[in-house]
Amino acid sequence: MLKSVVPNIYLLEAGYVNMYLCEEADGLTLIDCGTPKSQALVWAAVAELGRQRADLKRILITHADIDHAGSAAAIQAETGAMVYAGAETAVLLQKGKSPKHMPRLIQFIIDTFMGYRPIPETAIQVVQDGDELPITAGLQVLATPGHTLDHHSFYSPAQGILFAGDALNTKDGRLQSTPKRITADQEAARRSAIRLLQLAPAAIACGHGLPSSNHSGGDLMALFNQLRQN
């Protein structure tokens, strides 16, 4: 059963990573695509909404890690959807490669053994900070480097939902920023998290952990102050 985060936006749990499906009159938008072979979860969700695969019109990628982009090529090829991604992410998607941000040995294993199916350049539309997409009555594109240098987040002022990718996550019900050990640039990550918290989103659809929708302003301020002090 689909889990609603806010009206017409649904959580798809793909193991330890999240995807989000947005339903609108003109079709569906998928935000992040999970690990390779996660497309069956997407097809099941599309069917549950009473839609066809061809109704998936847009795919948004927060960053090119294999657990966020691994099934993007398969989903795009089946639906013909346009893939929206930042410029650095777009380059990596065309190579089927994850960005560098992990500890050295793990990064070597990822680079050597864990590629994913690449996406054709013609299927990708590059977005940048400040762009607005015709989704959720105006979805803002926000450059949020740190966890990876190519990272972007997406925010809908109309619905108060932030698609934070890995810039923020939840653990044991607590909101937190990206862990230091898997972060490419800790200072950039701190600035990006502060930027996102300043939006005071009503719902935070993060890449890992359950989406946060019952947090208070005090919860956001506590993390904000912690990051400011650091």
Image (cartoon, rainbow, N blue to C red):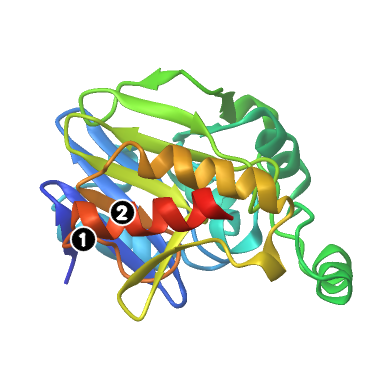
Of residue 114 and residue 53, the one placed in the foreground of this image is 114
Amino acid at dot 2: Leu
Residue extending furthest front? Answer: 229
Location of the N terminus by quadrant is bottom left
Task: Kindly identify which residue carries mark 1.
Answer: 215
Q: Position of residue 15 (x, y in %)?
A: 44, 77
Choose top left, top right, bottom left or bottom right for residue 45.
bottom left
Amino acid at dot 1: His
Residue extending furthest top? Answer: 131
Q: Residue at x 48, y 31 (%)?
A: 142
Location of the C terminus by quadrant is bottom right
Number of numbered callouts drawn: 2
Q: Secondary structure at mark 1?
A: loop
The residues bearing labels 1 and 2 have C-alpha atoms spaced at a distance of 7 Å
| Labels 1 & 2 near each other (Cβ < 8 A) | yes
Above or below for 72 versus 131: below
